[in-house]
Amino acid sequence: MADGRGASQAQRRPKQRAPARADGHPHHIFVGEYDADGVFFYQAYSAAIADFAVANQRLGGPAFNVERMTWIKPSFAWMLYRAGYGSKHGQERVLKLKLPHDAVADLLLGCACKHGGGGSKGRVQWDPARDLMSSDGRGHSAEPRKMLRERAIQVGLSRSLSAHFVASTTSIEDVTMLAWRVGEAHRERDVPTAMRALAAEASLPYERPYTPRLPPEELERLGIRPMDAAVEASVEEHEGYLPHVDDGADTETYDGADSSGAPEENGGAGHVEHVAYACKQVAATGHRPPRGRAALECVPSLALNQGPDRNNVVQG
């Protein structure tokens, strides 16, 4: 008879990878904050560039080079990781910029989906996502927690695409103070409690799955998994897509079957990590959203997909 460990390993269900594109690479979900008018992205700049941008509501000024590759990120947590919560040289100020939906689509059309090279004018890459509500490391080494089975999109723009981005931006907000406060909470001994307190009094980003207004073949090319109408309606019903306060344990993996082994009606959702369909009150109270079949029923087909780990490319 096998021991307990052997039995557990024998009963463990095989993991499924993210749905693959025609070229064999996985699809991922674009997650960000948006409204009827557009999508929000984050960038970190020096004080000189940020001061000009906020004052004039456009990027520019003597310190800004529109020809240089610039990276925009819809994930606030990823921006905080990259900028060290606004502490790195030349990234002391964190800005939140809004682009109209059509402008987002236009910029993505000009991008190649590459990692580590290619896409001289524009590049889409998918890096391990970061969790806003929890952290890795202690004290000054803390950073938003790395989520290995979930990817966050980044878009690199240069030359004509960078100019189009600058011209299309409709609003610019300085969110440096919020970045600092999240950093302070992540350095606390009890991060979940600190983040619940911050969520209760501060306006944290309202991020949820988003489908750019692109033809299916372009979404396929860029590795973006489109959200079907049922998912989008369910996400809206549950007031958004926010990381929940986690206890640091590994997230669960679902393979499209319930505890009896019967397949889910949606045909299998693949990896579901941080199914955080709940509203801001969930983050504020620390109540964990339901998992397993209950979570999939609340947000049908919602799957944050895994892909091969890749090294992060230094951003501008």
Image (cartoon, rainbow, N blue to C red):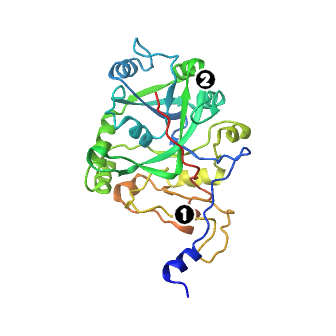
Q: Residues within 10 Å of mark 2 (few under 14, many from 20)?
A: some
> Which quarter of the figure has residue 179?
top left
Q: Is residue 134 above or below residue 168?
A: below
* Place of residue 81 in the rendered image (x, y in percent of width and height, measured from the top left): 40, 40
> Which quarter of the figure has residue 153?
top right
* Place of residue 112 in the rendered image (x, y in percent of width and height, measured from the top left): 64, 31
Q: Is residue 74 above or below residue 139?
A: above
Q: Return the residue at label 2.
A: 121
* Place of residue 145 in the rendered image (x, y in percent of width and height, measured from the top left): 40, 50
Residue at 40% across / 57% down in the picture? 282
In this image, 181 relative to 72: left or right? left
Q: Is residue 74 above or below residue 169?
A: below
- Please report contact status of discs 2 and 1: CB closer than 8 Å, yes or no: no
CA gap, disc 2 and disc 1:
37 Å
The three-letter code of the residue at mark 1 reads: Thr
In this image, 119 relative to 72: left or right? right
Disc sitting over residue 219 in the figure: none
The three-letter code of the residue at mark 2 reads: Lys
**Element carrying mark 2:** loop
Which quadrant, please, contains the N terminus?
bottom right
Identify which residue, 10 or 256, lies in the foreground: 10
Residue at 34% across / 18% down in the picture? 48
Identify which residue, 100 or 190, lies in the foreground: 190
Whichever of callouts 2 and 1 sits on the residue coming sooner in the sequence is 2
* Place of residue 198 in the rendered image (x, y in percent of width and height, measured from the top left): 30, 48
Q: Return the residue at label 1.
A: 253
Q: Which residue appears farthest toward the bottom when viewing the image?
A: 1
Residue at 38% across / 19% down in the picture? 49
Number of marks present in the image shown: 2
**Element carrying mark 1:** loop
In this image, 271 relative to 94: left or right? right
